[in-house]
Amino acid sequence: MSTTSTSTTIGRQLADLCREGRNLEAIETLYSDDIVSVEACPMPSFDQRMAGKAAVTGKNQWWVENHEVHDGDVAGPFPHGDDRFCLLFNYDVTNKPSGQRMQLTEVGLFTIVDGKITKEEFFYQMDGPAPA
């Protein structure tokens, strides 16, 4: 596999922006207008499956407003062909409404069509109640 594949290039760009806390910029620049986002489970504040850049931006704005990030790391990308890659996210966060501090690990699987991320799927274990 070429190290300059589309999945590697876009994966590196996304990982770098996420490491810098520039997630909203990543959505604006790397995501398709028709992005589909699928969480591992439904959350009280949003649906498990969301479609469209505005909905995904809103989900990310909700995350920023409701969580204090103490530490975070993004590993990858781990490309799979030219149209998919994974990133591994590790975060130490406090849920602002509840005050609960938690360590989160999740895998994001991203699909690319025509040079834009068209689907993101997140995999993680939820122990106990979902964050508010």
Image (spheres, helix red, strand yellow):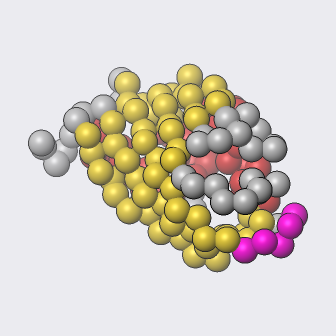
Query: In the figure, 72 relative to 40: above or below?
Result: below
Q: Position of residue 130 (x, y in %)?
A: 75, 53
Indicate left or right for 84 with 127 as reference: left
Q: Residue at x 47, y 28 (%)?
A: 118
Prevailing secondary structure of the magenta residues: loop
Magenta extent: 97-101
- Kindly tell me whether residue 26 is visible in this rendering: yes
84 part of magenta stretch = no
Query: In the figure, 75 relative to 123: above or below?
Result: below
Q: How many marks?
A: 0
98 part of magenta stretch = yes
- The quadrant in which the C terminus is found is bottom right
Q: Residue at x 51, y 56 (%)?
A: 106
Going by the picture, which residue comes out furthest to the front?
A: 128
- The quadrant in which the N terminus is found is top left
Q: Residue at x 40, y 53 (%)?
A: 87
Q: Position of residue 23 (x, y in %)?
A: 57, 52
Query: In the figure, 60 relative to 69: above or below?
Result: above
Going by the picture, which residue comes out furthest to the left?
A: 1
Q: Nearer the viewer, residue 74 or 27?
A: 74
Q: Nearer the viewer, residue 70 or 115?
A: 70
Going by the picture, which residue comes out furthest to the right?
A: 97
Indicate left or right for 95 with 11 as reference: right
Q: Position of residue 98 (x, y in %)?
A: 86, 67
- Kindly tell me whether residue 65 is visible in this rendering: no
Q: Nearer the viewer, residue 55 or 26?
A: 55
Q: Position of residue 2 (x, y in %)?
A: 12, 43
Q: Residue at x 53, y 44 (%)?
A: 122
Indicate left or right for 30 with 62 as reference: left
Using the rendered view, name the quadrant where residue 101 is placed: bottom right
